[in-house]
Image: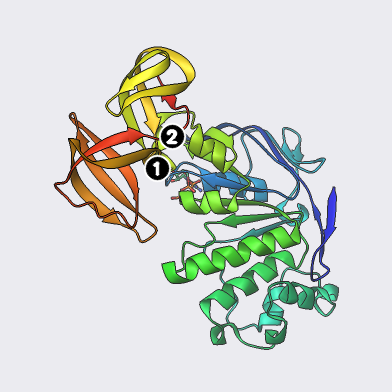
Amino acid sequence: MNEESNRSGIVVDARGVNVKGVDKSFGDTAVLHNIDLSVEPGTSLALLGPSGCGKTTLLRLIAGLERPDGGEISVGARTMAGSSTWVPPEKRNVGMVFQDWALFPHLTVGKNVGYGLDRAERKGPRVNEALDMVGLADLADRMPDTLSGGQQQRVALARAIAPRPSVLLLDEPFSNLDSALRVGVRTEVHRLLIDLGITSIFVTHDQEEAFVLGDEVAVMQGGRIEQIGSPQTIYQTPSSPWIASFVGDVNLLSGSGNGVEAETVVGGLRLAEPSNGPLQVLVRPEDLALTADGPGTITLTEYYGHDMMVTVELDGQSVLVRAPARAEWMRGDRVSVSYIGEAANAFS
Ligand code: ATP
């Protein structure tokens, strides 16, 4: 148990979540295979993966909206789903925020927030506390259609936290927002989750969102968890070439391992783990630097403001290099590429 009081006085009893050996099929289609994960109380876990990999199904199993075919799900010390146990969703003390954050259009903001509470609690302090938490205490009497998109999302969040759930589940919470609003709302929700001290699990197919919001990230593919770890671990030491490419720009350079070193198109690199024979060496674009003149030719530049991505054809391989924004590289420039990273990870 991890009881914490935050700036608006809401006390959440954050609980951990454990999923052990969970399987789920729909008809003949196996959608989740032997899922294991554990989320510490008060931390956030991102479920990251491509469309159809089973993220939402896993979230719905934790919420109790689906039943597992095998395995066990517990929240805190309490088993919610297991071979002989089933706790219905409304008894799990788990809040859920859906993709569209839909509010009831015919109810005021206050009534929307009170919707999930017992009748007696709807008139009590919980509605105002939750609205206060999201900075909208003055808007309890307004109708949803008089609010901005960002305010509506905050009301939906207040509705989910008003019953003081031990765990908050969010399904693609920002995917319906346009990109201008998205980053702002994401930062606001991030602050709120930290301030509340609540355990949260959220689904996303967006690597940046998973890294920004998740204390830990579970990367899923084809109904399995491929890797689970901190954003740094997933980015720096991905467990497969597929994960390396899914979580950011990467060069998987063909190389030849010679114990502690590998020979590649960008020269000899130190390896994090000694290896011999043919390798794919993982080199992030920010681990490379360009200098004028040399064997490579720039074939593409993409300017992002904070930096620039440069594609270099080098000895028959296409190499991505992240260059400082002030650099003035142009298509057709001849360049050398050198490695400036730490000891590199490689896949044999
Ligand atoms: P997306 O990012 O596209 O929402 P996802 O990773 O959340 O994808 P799920 O929604 O969990 O994926 O779906 C996983 C697979 O299970 C898909 O192939 C989907 O068609 C299937 N599926 C999900 N729910 C059901 C259902 N109720 N009946 C039959 N098949 C289902």
x, y percent for residue 248: 41, 44
Q: Would residue 168 be found to the left or right of residue 202 on screen?
A: right
The circle drawn on residue 89 is none
x, y percent for residue 140: 70, 84
Q: Where is the C terminus found, in terms of image quarters?
A: top left
Q: Are marks 2 and 1 in contact (CB under 8 Å)?
A: yes
Q: CA distance from mark 2 to mark 1?
A: 8 Å
Which callout, 2 or 1, points at the residue further toward the start of the chain? Answer: 1
Indicate yes or no: mark 2 CB to ligand 1 under 8 Å: no
Amino acid type indicated by mark 1: Glu
Q: Secondary structure at mark 1?
A: helix
Amino acid type indicated by mark 2: Gly
Residue 144 in the image: above or below residue 243: below
Task: Examine the rendering and report whether any part of residue 31 can be seen.
Answer: no
Indicate yes or no: mark 1 CB to ligand 1 under 8 Å: no
Look at 78% across and 48% down and name the residue there.
Answer: 15
x, y percent for residue 227: 54, 33
Q: Secondary structure at mark 2?
A: loop
Q: Is the residue marked by circle 2 packed among few (<14), some (14-19), or many (20+) residues within 10 Å?
A: some
**170 or 212: nearer the viewer:** 212
**235 or 324: nearer the viewer:** 324
**107 or 183: nearer the viewer:** 183
- Name the residue that disc number 2 marks: 341
Residue 101 in the image: above or below residue 306: below
- Name the residue that disc number 1 marks: 286
Quarter assignment of residue 296: top left
Quarter assignment of residue 75: top right
